[in-house]
Amino acid sequence: MAYFTQQLVNGLALGAIYGLIAIGYTMVYGIVGMINFAHGEVFMVGSFIALIGFMICAMAGISSAPVAILLVLLIAMSFSAVYGWAIERTAYRPLRGSFRLAPLISAIGVSIVLQNYVQLVQGARPRAAAGKARPCAGPFSWTRARAGLCRHSHYFGERWRGGP
């Protein structure tokens, strides 16, 4: 029974991550009007930034999990936003008025560049994080965090008038 419960929690967590990525694709397509194939790579860069941030927090002696998570979330979101902004300014905005296939080719190119960039910087071999991770320890709720992110993403997409 414990194995089934663990697999159920794993499935729900993975499904929530897939849901967030799908919401991101939908928001980008709705706002910009094009499919961004580099969307997953921006998530990947944010994940690596978060991993590096956790390692820096551990080296700095920050042992409080909520403080470390808050710092890492702010850092990873900030870097991911800067990456997204830079990609939009350099690869997508110049191609807005061109034929329909040009932004698609540019999106695939940005995706390949980001994949290879992270592979060069982080290395091609899989690595395990040091120590034992306990994501369900303490009063922090991953479900509430994901629900809050979805709620704020929806609010941002509905209320923001920056548009393309």
Image: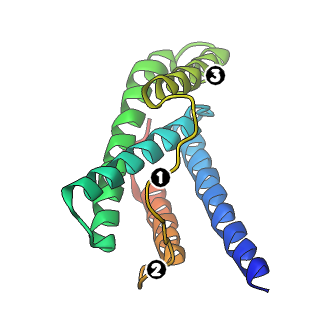
Amino acid type at circle 2 is Ala
Q: Which mark lies nearer to you, 2 or 1?
A: 1
According to the image, what is the colour scheme of the structure?
A: rainbow
**How crowded is the residue under tag 2: few (<14 C-alpha within 10 Å), some, or many (20+)?**
few
> What's the residue at 47%, 59% (across, down)?
153
Q: Quadrant of residue 10?
A: bottom right
**Rendered view: 116 above or below 148:** above
Q: Position of residue 94 (x, y in %)?
A: 44, 16
**Rendered view: 35 above or below 100:** below
Amino acid type at circle 3 is Leu
> What's the residue at 39%, 42% (across, down)?
80
> What's the residue at 23%, 64% (across, down)?
62
Is mark 3 in CB contact (under 8 Å) with mark 2? no
Q: Position of residue 92 (x, y in %)?
A: 48, 23
Q: Position of residue 140 (x, y in %)?
A: 42, 79
Q: Secondary structure at mark 1?
A: loop
The residue wearing badge 2 is 137
Name the residue nearer the viewer: 159 or 119.
119
How many badges with numbers are in the image?
Answer: 3
The residue wearing badge 1 is 129
Q: Quadrant of the N terminus?
A: bottom right
Residue 60 has which mark? Answer: none
Is mark 1 in CB contact (under 8 Å) with mark 3? no
Question: Could you tell me if residue 157 is visible in this image?
Answer: yes
The residue wearing badge 3 is 104
Q: Secondary structure at mark 2?
A: loop
**Rendered view: 139 above or below 54:** below
Amino acid type at circle 1 is Ala
Residue 156 vs residue 125: left or right? left
Residue 39 vs residue 76: left or right? right
Q: Position of residue 159 (x, y in %)?
A: 41, 58
Say which label, 2 or 1, has the lower sequence index.
Answer: 1
